[in-house]
Image (cartoon, coloured by chain):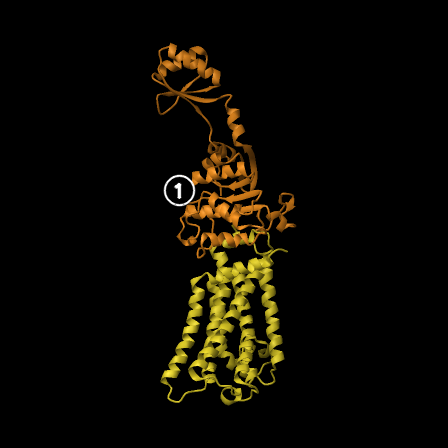
Amino acid sequence: MFNFAGLVMNENMKIYRRARTWVMLGIMLLLVLCISVGTRLIATNLPSMWSVFNWESVVGFLLITVFTTIVAAGSVADEFTTGTIKLLLIRPWSRSKILLSKYISVLLFALLQTVLLYLFLLALNALLFGYDNSAASDSIAPFYKGTAAVYFIQYFFYHFISLIVTATMAFMISAVFRSGGLAIGLSLFLILIVNSFVGLFAILNYAWVDYLLFIHLDLVQYLNGTPLREGMTLGFSLAVLGIYYVVFVALTWFVFNKRDVAA
Amino acid sequence: MMVGLMSLTGGEIKIDGYSITKQYQKAIRNVGAIVENPEMYKYLSGYQNLIHFARMIPDISDERIEEVVKLVGLGARIHDKVRTYSLGMRQRLGVAQAILHRPKLLILDEPTNGLDPAGIRELRDYLRQLAKDEGISIFVSSHLLAEMELMCDRVAIIQNGKLIDVRSIKQQSDDQAESRRFIFEVGNVVEAIAIMARLGHPAEADGQSAAIAVEADRELVAKLNAAFVEGGVSVYGIRAQSKSLEDQFLEMTGGEQIV
């Protein structure tokens, strides 16, 4: 096997050479900047840096989810829309590897955003509100043992896992339906709309509700010690996510490898 | 189908001895292709597009990229975004990505689609030169018969998915050199036909103009010309009427509706 890294570099080039990627990153950073600065200017009673951090990570992850979905959805579908898929596939590479390189580049983009958001929030809020090394239980998570900085590393990590599942779903829809718009619309619909009904679902007393993807997408519930449904554990949630993940990936690969690319 | 984008309904395709289904990566290694319009990444520059495709094939040096860029004459604009390219330039960039890895077989689907006359000519000359200098076989599919006549050495005609005929363009014009239809432009058609009759050759007036049409070989043409001049009929022009590929195509396919 020769240079597989080259394929990933290609996909990265296609992500970062587009203006939209930088617009998205810019929006994210600008928004949290505005929140921090705004709070600093308006607040009479300065909040701790971690509570600001907390609000902003909620907003930040909402944006990251949307942006990752957009990129994941475009990754395969755009190639079909523009017709470049034909040029891409007639190279001495198997379709699986081409798909894998796309998938990796999407995950790298998700990772980049997550790390960027964390570092930016940390630096910004420490600067504006003063660094404080207090325990997380002081301000944000009453049941958490450990400092707030560590809490948020774990918080981001859990969110990143959900992000991977979401991105994989968008990627699957993109590869299966070959339409970027549909992939973006459907994924966002599922994530944003269904998530607001998750609370309702969670009250339902049926066994099958335990296996719904959306109940498990929010892993942070375990950090705060307030699971949506009684008796759910982190391990169980991860197992359910894992099964969905495998199904998504298998379906994506199967469809992409079998498909005729009509001229 | 030939490049593995669609699965085969039957039979087998071998490129350079490798089956396209079983040894895809080896088979495709020697192929360069443009499928329909040369779609490139519009938000990248031409050069980045080439880098992109070069990365997918082992051992493409930067010099090779430069060389190809020069070859297709995009030197001045290669670092501009593809979005700003004209169709002809995109077509040339398409050719560039197809020959980047020195393929043995170049497959082009409707390569002259949307090109202006100058662009078509340029592409044709360029492909001919490639075939001659780099020893590349070029496989072109098109419905523009006149263009194919100029571009190709051999044509295959496919109707309703069945191969009807394969023939060589050059050979066919040689064959016809023996006896074909000649048009004489003459001053007096009636007189000319009379002379012809006297020599024992049937001739007919060619509808639209002061001309007659004769089936003849080269010798006979010269003889007829002499006879006309002797008989006081002015001859303004003699030309051979060759059947175009289009005529042959219609003959062969019976002029049916081609879907």
The N terminus of chain A - image quarter: bottom right
The residue lying toward the viewer, choosing from A18 and A98, is: A18
Query: Residue A138, image x and y in percent?
Result: 51, 89
Query: Residue A90, image x and y in percent?
Result: 56, 51
Q: Examine the rendered structure and indicate whether residue A96 appears above or below residue A119.
A: above
The residue lying toward the viewer, choosing from B150 and B11, is: B150
Q: Quadrant of residue A24?
A: bottom left
Q: Is residue A178 left or right of residue A34?
A: right
Amino acid residing under circle 1: Asp
Number of callouts: 1
Dot 1 surroundings within 10 Å: few (below 14), some, or many (20 or more)?
few
Q: What chain does mark 1 sit on?
A: B
Query: Residue B39, image x and y in percent?
Result: 47, 51
Find disc 1 in the rendering and name its residue.
Answer: B116
The residue lying toward the viewer, choosing from A24 and B246, is: A24
Query: Residue A125, image x and y in percent?
Result: 45, 81
Identify the colour of chain A in the image.
yellow
Q: Is residue B186 left or right of residue A70?
A: left
Q: Is residue B62 among the parts visible in the rendering?
A: yes
Q: Is residue B228 left or right of residue B154?
A: left
Q: Is residue A83 among the parts visible in the rendering?
A: no
Q: Examine the rendered structure and indicate whether residue B28 appears above or below residue B218.
A: below
Identify the colour of chain B in the image.
orange
Q: Examine the rendered structure and indicate whether residue B237 appears above or below residue B120.
A: above
Tag 1, which secondary structure?
loop
Q: Quadrant of residue B120?
A: top left
Residue closest to the far left = B187
